[in-house]
Image (cartoon, rainbow, N blue to C red):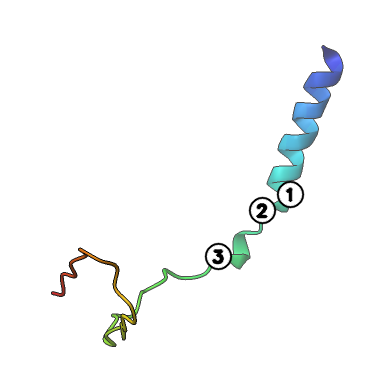
């Protein structure tokens, strides 16, 4: 039982030491998608429908 407590203490100390506060980046701002994808259907299956908005 005592070895398990030492293991948890070691893992906790390792996770604290592995965290680097200076490596945080700013918020990621996604760029808007302005290019429409190109879809080409070469051979549709029988009785299929395609909805395009």
Residue at 19 percent of width and 70 percent of height:
50
Residue at 75 percent of width and 39 percent of height:
13
The mark that comes first in sequence, 2 or 3, is 2
Tell me: 13 left or right of 49.
right
Callout 3 secondary element: loop
Within 10 Å of disc 3 (Cα), the crowding (few <14, some 14-19, many 20+) is few
Q: Position of residue 20 (x, y in %)?
A: 66, 59
Q: Position of residue 1 (x, y in %)?
A: 82, 11
CA–CA distance between discs 1 and 3? 15 Å
CA–CA distance between discs 2 and 3? 10 Å
Q: Do the numbered discs 1 and 2 sit on residues whose CB atoms are within 8 Å?
A: yes
Q: Quadrant of residue 5?
A: top right
Between residues 37 and 45, which one lies in front from this camera angle? 45
The mark that comes first in sequence, 1 or 3, is 1
List the residue tagged with mark 3. Answer: 24
Q: Do the numbered discs 2 and 3 sit on residues whose CB atoms are within 8 Å?
A: no
Label disc, if present, on residue 41 of the rendered structure = none
Dividing the image into 4 quarters, which one contains the C terminus? bottom left
Q: Position of residue 28 (x, y in %)?
A: 42, 71
Question: Would you place residue 7 above or below residue 14 in this image?
Answer: above
Q: Position of residue 45 (x, y in %)?
A: 29, 68
Label disc, if present, on residue 17 of the rendered structure = 1
Residue at 82 percent of width and 25 percent of height:
6
Question: Would you place residue 33 above or below residue 18 in this image?
Answer: below
Tell me: 28 left or right of 13.
left
Tell me: 41 left or right of 2.
left
**Residue extending furthest toward the left:** 53
Q: Quadrant of residue 24?
A: bottom right
Callout 1 secondary element: helix
Q: Do the numbered discs 1 and 3 sit on residues whose CB atoms are within 8 Å?
A: no
List the residue tagged with mark 2. Answer: 19
């Amino acid at each position: 039982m005592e070895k398990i407590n030492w293991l948890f203490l070691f893992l906790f100390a390792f996770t604290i030491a592995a965290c680097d506060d200076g490596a945080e980046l700013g918020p990621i701002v996604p760029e808007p998608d302005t290019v429409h994808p190109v879809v080409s259907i070469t051979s549709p299956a029988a009785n299929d429908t395609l909805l395009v908005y």
